[in-house]
Image (tube, rainbow, N blue to C red):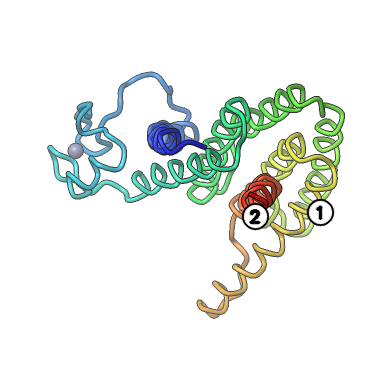
Amino acid sequence: MHGIFLVFAFLLGLAFGSFANVLIYRVPRGLSLLWPASHCPVCKTPIRWHDNIPLFSYVWLRGRCRFCKARISPRYPLVELLTGLLFLVFAVVDHSWLSFVFHALLGTLVIVLVAIDLEHHRLPDPLTFSVAILGLLWAVVTQTLWTGIQGFLVGGAFGGGLAWLAEKWYGTDEGFGWGDAKYLAAMGTWVGPWAVTVILFGGALLGSIVGLLLGLRRRTLRFGLPFGPFLSVVFLLTILAPQFIIELKSWILR
Ligand SMILES: [Zn+2]
């Protein structure tokens, strides 16, 4: 796509990343998304608009609150940057405005889910449901509703089965949970029944490798890693890969 559009997509991603940060902080704490306005979590001073510019304000204020100088988590600029980059990638591979809009919304939700899962070890229902609703809408737009429904059912069945087994084996909280099962069903609406199975095994493989590496480093093999981030990485790759191949082909044949 056009260069100007790519810059616009990146800046739009930074803005959505800023909103993603609001969701990441407020959704798991059950706080309202609209009220109050963004404020410093330490001194409660409302953040002025010019101190709330994605990425730049963090650098400008050297990662501290303007008033009480409390340290601001580097998660804020990191989430903004990642969302910006993801929007940029979608802007490169998507060939229509509509698919860019759907992918951008999905990408934001996925980043929010990953951040919440890393911090709280759970995937809130309103967010995974949003992924499913968006996926079914996209399936209607692309006339693949039946594939989307099949993906939802297969993802839900595999995910539910695994969550049930994990509950039997580990008791609670360990390994694959019900949040992961719902997330997997939601992913199924986007990628269909076959790819959702690949995501499950790919995510499990990636999680085991990372878990082993971390476990070896700490000389323990306790598996307390959340599953969502690994599923998310494979999910995004699954969505992006075919688009990338199309892009690459047209670039080579040009
Ligand atoms: Zn402060």
Helix, strand or loop for disc 2: helix
Ligand 1, seen in the image, is in the quarter at top left
Image quadrant where residue 67 sits = top left
| Residue situated furthest left in the rendering | 67
Q: Residues within 10 Å of mark 1 (few under 14, many from 20)?
A: some
Could you tell me which residue is drawn at 63 percent across and 32 percent down?
125
Above or below residue 40? Residue 220 is below
Residue 188 at x, y percent in the picture: 77, 39
Q: Is residue 231 visible to the viewer in this orientation of the structure?
A: no
Task: Tell me the mark number nearer the camera, choosing from 2 and 1.
Answer: 2
Near-viewer residue (110 or 32): 110
Helix, strand or loop for disc 1: helix
- The answer to whether residue 131 is left or right of residue 40 is right
Q: Is residue 229 visible to the viewer in this orientation of the structure?
A: yes
Residue 75 at x, y percent in the picture: 37, 48
At label 1, which amino acid type do we have? Leu
Residue 133 at x, y percent in the picture: 69, 25
Could you tell me how far apart the alpha carbons at marks 2 and 1 are, in whole angstroms?
A: 47 Å
Residue 59 at x, y percent in the picture: 22, 47
Above or below residue 226? Residue 12 is above
Image quadrant where residue 156 sits = top right
Q: Which mark sits nearer the N-terminus, 2 or 1?
A: 1
Near-viewer residue (145 or 208): 145
Could you tell me which residue is drawn at 72 percent across and 59 percent down?
202
Above or below residue 45? Residue 69 is below
Report the disc number at residue 165.
1
At label 2, which amino acid type do we have? Ile
Q: Residues within 10 Å of mark 2 (few under 14, many from 20)?
A: few
Near-viewer residue (171 or 97): 97
Report the disc number at residue 59.
none
Could you tell me which residue is drawn at 19 percent across and 41 percent down?
65
Report the disc number at residue 252.
2
